[in-house]
Image (tube, rainbow, N blue to C red):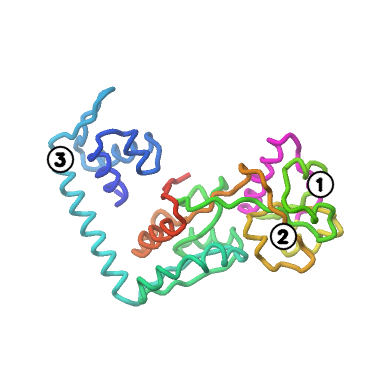
Amino acid sequence: MRISYFKEFIVLSKYLNFSIAADLLNMTQPGLSRHISAIENELGIKLLERDTHNVKLTQNGISFLESAKRIIDEYENLLEKLVDAGSSQLRIGIPYFGIKRYISNLVGGFESAHPNVQLKYLPAYPETIVDALLSKQVDLGILPRINSPNSKRLVFHDAFREHLTVLMHCDHPLASKSSLQLADLRNENFLSIEGYYTGAMLEFQHDFCRRAGFEPRIVLTAKTIEEAVLNMKSAKGVLMMPGHLNEASISFHIKSVDLAEPQCYFTISLCHHPDNNNPLLEPFIDYYLKVTDKKSVSITI
């Protein structure tokens, strides 16, 4: 039984309304219902009486609520002690070119509040970060939330939206524009990047083109962003990527132009293995979501 289920039960017990509780918890009603059922099945007791109009606590539910509150209080006290005890470490995987936007300007407050905590970073490509999360070589990753084979084994907490940008050689005809619409890309050559996660990211982006009525014409597939950049001029191609790439110094010959259409964005999320028990995960996630001014949406896809 996960500690988050206790928290969900406490919120549900306060409002006795699955719709309200699920909304406050930023999760679906079926998901909340499954978690409550999981508690009931594991304990072998009924916590709630439900009909089409009402939800109320059983006597066992009332007793469990008090226990759940004590467990959460003790858990949070334990976290605080562990965080302040020293020699604590949180290992974070982050995309190479996303360090400035995703981490550098955001973690100062956490480090000040927890001076004994050591944050260690693994700058890498998304596939490497996902593999490290699954093997528990890192505790937390900061990645776009997409449907890819191995991402289905991770838990995601949505943090913020990042709009897309289009990379191209500075001699490209579109490089003089201040922003782009999808229609501007209708007749362009597209570059792609290999990898089960990066490939899924590009497929996600190319779906925006398909909704705009055209199929992206892939003329070259590279193994890395750097390789794609080296071939941009000769291929006369463009590469759609997350917006932080317009801050990266990949090459003096590359121009980045943002897509102005509001629907073209990635949801950037904190992700971790569901069985990672590092006590720093929850306080760091709570802090990060607070400073990015977003609520947590915890889902396993």
Image-based side of 268 in relation to 297, left or right: right
Q: Mostly what secondary structure, the magenta segment?
A: helix
The secondary element bearing badge 3 is classed as: helix
Query: Looking at the image, do the residues carrying marks 1 and 2 touch, with CB atoms under 8 Å apart?
Result: no
Q: What x and y, as percent, mark residue 194?
A: 69, 55
Task: Name the foreground residue: 264 vs 275.
Answer: 264
| Mark 3 residue type | Ile
- In the depicted structure, whether residue 2 falls above or below residue 90: above
Residue at the image position 45 percent from the left and 67 percent from the top: 107
Q: Within the image, what quadrant is residue 40 found in?
A: top left
Task: In the rendered structure, find residue 62 and report the number of the disc placed on it.
Answer: 3
Total marks placed:
3
Q: Please give the residue where the numbered disc 1 appears in the rendered image.
A: 188
- In the depicted structure, whether residue 157 falls above or below residue 132: above
Residue at the image position 68 percent from the left and 35 percent from the top: 211
Image-based side of 282 in relation to 249, left or right: left
The secondary element bearing badge 1 is classed as: loop
Q: Give the range drawn in magenta.
A: 196-221
| Mark 1 residue type | Glu
Measure the C-alpha gap from mark 1 to mark 2.
21 Å
The secondary element bearing badge 2 is classed as: loop
Packing grade of label 1 (10 A; few <14, some 14-19, many >=20) is: some
Task: Name the foreground residue: 78 vs 162.
Answer: 162
